[in-house]
Amino acid sequence: MLVPSPWFRLTAALLCALPVLAQVQPQDAELAERLYRSGERAYAAKAYKEALDTWGQLLQTAPRSDFAPMALLRLARHQVEVERKPDAAMPILDRLRSEYIKSPEAAEGLLMRGLLLARQARRPAELKDAMAEFNRVLDLFPDARARGEARLHLGRAWRDQGQLGRALQQFIDAFRLNAGSPVVPQAMLEAAETLDLMGDLPGCLQMLQRLRVEAPQSPEAVEATWRMAVRVKHRLQKPPFRNEGPWPTGLTKWLKTPTLLMVAPDGDLLIFQNDLDRTFRLHGSDLVQQGPSAPGTRVLINTPTSFWMVSKTGLVREDAVAAQPLGVLGAVSGAALDRWGNLWVADAKTPAISVFAPDGTARTMASPTANALAPLPTGGVVIAADADRKLLFLDGDGQPRTIVPYGKDLPAPFRYVTALASDGVGQVAALVDGGDYGEGVVLFGPDGSVLRQATFKSLGVNGRITSLALDHSGGLILCDRRNDLLIRLN
């Protein structure tokens, strides 16, 4: 009879013991919890280094405990929310996904990873990897709280790619299946905007009203209120423009050569005053200086948190100390920041548009020579091409979505577009001049249709109008450089 080798007996014993060794010992589990709670205490006291070191020690001493994925998620959040270093969070989230995919924290980790990948995208085609992470949350975690937010962001990605039906279904599921969650009003607002893009204005307005009724205290309800108002006024009622005169009422001799206007995301009006070379914020009746001096500013640009100025020396940020050069562009005629973070800049002498990404890289996009630009909420921009006498509504890749010849559906054609402005619901206002139409304003819908129009002669406006802006109550603000005042059309 053969006698088993002692080496064979030792190997067999080890194999039998592996399941036992793989289990977390009670003392290890207890240590892991103590380390995690200690890190939480330090983090709450903003002793971040102590907290990070403690969680790092947990991962070294008890990597198989239930608290290990919790520590990884906290470490990743710290990099994103406190350090503002999303690139540093990615390896942490990669480890959470590869080593702890069965943990409840993996759902939050996949969602965060998807959000970071979506933030890196600079055009719709680059959303593929982010969408894969959102889908993993839905596929792998049927009971996770992260599902609602995953649906919300998946819907936005589908909409960015032009898949409006798929986007709408994700938004509907997000608010239908997550009652009581903060995701609900966000999803309802996104559903309303998607319905509008699908050409269902009644459905859009009904959804906005439902949002106001069901979540009246939410920030989204405030958004819904002004979005409803401007749509009803401009697309349903379409009253003739009425000149309300100098605005705001009661302010006199308070401006010095205003030349540029822009409505900030919070509804305040930004005004660039040429003689002072500075931008000012009008909040109520208070005029407050904003940002550094920027002589020769030609364009004001909205960002989610601040504003930029494009001057003859380059791009000047609100909190910057020096201008950022914009290559060889010497005759900037327009600029706009798209929702992907790309800066589109047109040069009056160049039949192309330069697109600057947030990382500083630039590319040139074929285009007619553009003399004015404005951003669109769908991710692209609208440009005015005087040489071709056309307005072009471009998508995020620079492809024409809608082309509107100058003078279409107007009593007479015009020749030039002096300035463009847009609002958050896709409406575009044009300051026009020349031809039989003369000088005036035209308001276009998201599909390029003419909604409202008027000549300055018919309105009794007599000045040098250099810029315009669409406010959140459906009014149109004109910038009169000659008379140093603002005029509101309602």
Image: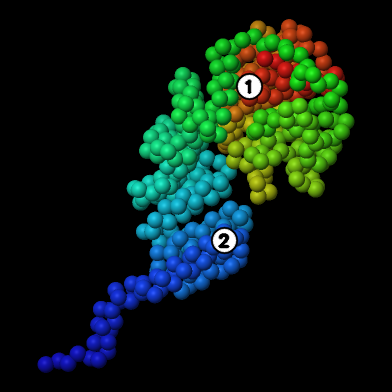
Question: Where does label 1 land, which residue?
Answer: 473
Find residue 345 and report its image quarter. top right
Residue 145 in percent (x, y) is at 41, 47
> Which of the labelled discs sits on residue 23, or is there none?
none
Residue nearest the observer in this picture, 345 or 323: 323
Question: Where does label 2 land, which residue?
Answer: 43
SS for tag 1? loop
**Label 2 Cα crowd, 10 Å radius (few <14 / some 14-19 / many 20+):** some
Amino acid type at circle 2 is: Tyr
Residue 367 in view, yes or no: no
Residue for point 49% across, 69% down? 35
Residue nearest the observer in this picture, 366 or 422: 422
Residue 406 in percent (x, y) is at 66, 17
**Label 1 Cα crowd, 10 Å radius (few <14 / some 14-19 / many 20+):** some
- The quarter in which the C terminus is drawn is top right
Amino acid type at circle 1 is: Ser
Residue for point 73% across, 7% down? 458
Residue 410 in percent (x, y) is at 64, 10
- The quarter in which the N terminus is drawn is bottom left
Residue for point 63% across, 42% down? 341
Q: Mark 1 against mark 2, which lies toward the viewer?
A: 2
Residue nearest the observer in this picture, 378 or 202: 202
Residue 472 in view, yes or no: yes
Residue 436 in percent (x, y) is at 73, 8
419 is higher (above) or lower (below) than 176: above
User: Which circle's residue, 1 or 2, is located before the other in the chain?
Assistant: 2
Residue for point 66% across, 29% down? 267
Left or right position of 145 against 239: left
